[in-house]
Image (tube, helix red, strand yellow):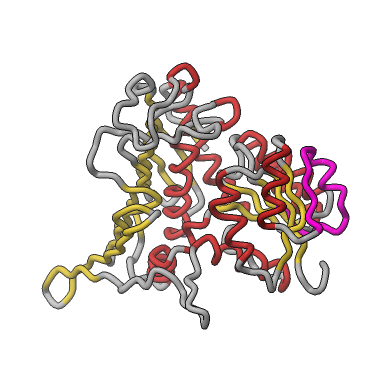
Amino acid sequence: MKNGKLQIGFIGCGGIAHQKHFPSLQQLGQLCDLVAFCDIVEERAVQSAAKYGTPDAKAYTDYLAMLTDESLDVVHILTPNVMHGEMTVAALEHGKHVMCEKPMAHTSADALKMIEAARKSGKKLTIGYQNRFREDAIIAHKASSAGELGEIYFAKAHAVRRRAVPTWGVFTDKKLQGGGPLIDIGTHALDLALWIMDNYKPVSVTGSAFYKLKDKFEGNMFGPWNPATFDVEDSAFGFIKMDNGATIYLESSWALNTTDTREASVTLCGTEGGAEMSGRASGGIQLTFNSAKHGSLFDESPQLQGGIAYFNGAKETDGTREARHWLEAILNDSELIVKPEQALVVTQILEAIYESARTGETVKL
């Protein structure tokens, strides 16, 4: 630490770095300094350091060279999915706290190595599931924890877009991402369902993955993609049974021909009531609780504020809340909201859906 602030370095200076991590952490200048930026494209690292870093911020193209800087306290891993495991383990072994972007890893074997490295190092490890910090998700979690929904025995995890395939970066490259919409956006919806249910004991998974639309890019929100480099699924679905008998249905797609689109949303059905998120995580989410009381059916919705106002009038986004919680957990040695052991279960289920889709068989966990 320097002047009471955590010193943060970044591996990966692409889209998620600029959209979430850099601006969120920049708002928390009283807690941290952004001092090291690494990317395989040197220009990206240099430009990121100039825009977001301290005056003496360093730019790297070799992440191992950056990790040798003993002044670094924290490292954020913001690279393609298949690199998460190796880079996280290396950062932990170099004595850094690690925030790794979702998903935790593209295999459960890598995720387990990350957890073991964190245990051995004594450093904190968390995963970038920022949707847990949305106001609607926090309220739903509180209601579930208070028993207001009773026993949640059925849930749907929604991650469905209509022709909104990302055409930048490496999203459609299986070698670097490990998969398509299931591992990209399905992971957020599944994480929310498991967290709000507080249920992390899956016993079986049955899944299907479809590769139907790689040549059908007409109307895509982000423009046409190259079919020759589109080697991930366009849709994947999973049926997950839990140890207590509860069932979760997970739907994920970048390009489903449907008008019922929802992303990072869940439907929860319990013995005392239900909760449903509708809309998109990027804006317009509505949370509705349903129950029966006074001899009638009730639907109730909280008045979501859309942010937390501070004295300067600024609103805190879910990404900034995530970052604030992460830094304060390190500084105060307090409990993490997103625990790596929970993120491991998400990875195990996603991996099982892909395996079930490949073999046509139910996967036992």
Relative to 48, say whether 139 is above or below. below
Q: Identify which residue is drawn at 30% across, 62% down.
A: 286
Q: Is residue 9 above or below residue 232?
A: below
Looking at the rendered structure, the number of numbered marks drawn on it comes to: 0
In the image shown, does 265 or 195 lie closer to the viewer? 265
Single out the residue that lies furthest toward the top. 228
Identify the residue at image location x=23%, y=71%. 300
Q: Is residue 133 magenta?
A: no
Instruction: Decide if residue 208 is in sight here.
Output: no
- Identity of the residue drawn at 55% across and 31% down: 170
Note whether 140 is above or below 250 in the view shown.
below
Determine if residue 221 is in view: yes
User: In the image, is 270 to the left or to the right of 82?
Assistant: left
Judging depth in this view, the residue of 190 and 248 nearest the camera is 190
Residue 63 on the magenta span:
yes
Image quarter of the N terminus: bottom right
Instruction: Report the side of 51 relative to 70 (left or right).
Output: left
Position in image of residue 15 (x %, y %): 56, 44
| Residue 205 in the figure: left or right of residue 67 | left
The picture quadrant where one finds residue 175 is: top right
Query: Which percent across, then down, holds residue 275?
Result: 30, 62
Q: Position of residue 190 (x, y in %)?
A: 44, 48
From which residue to which does the magenta span run?
A: 56-75
Q: Position of residue 22 (x, y in %)?
A: 62, 56
Judged from this view, the residue extending furthest toward the bottom is 311
| Location of residue 292 (image quadrant) | bottom left
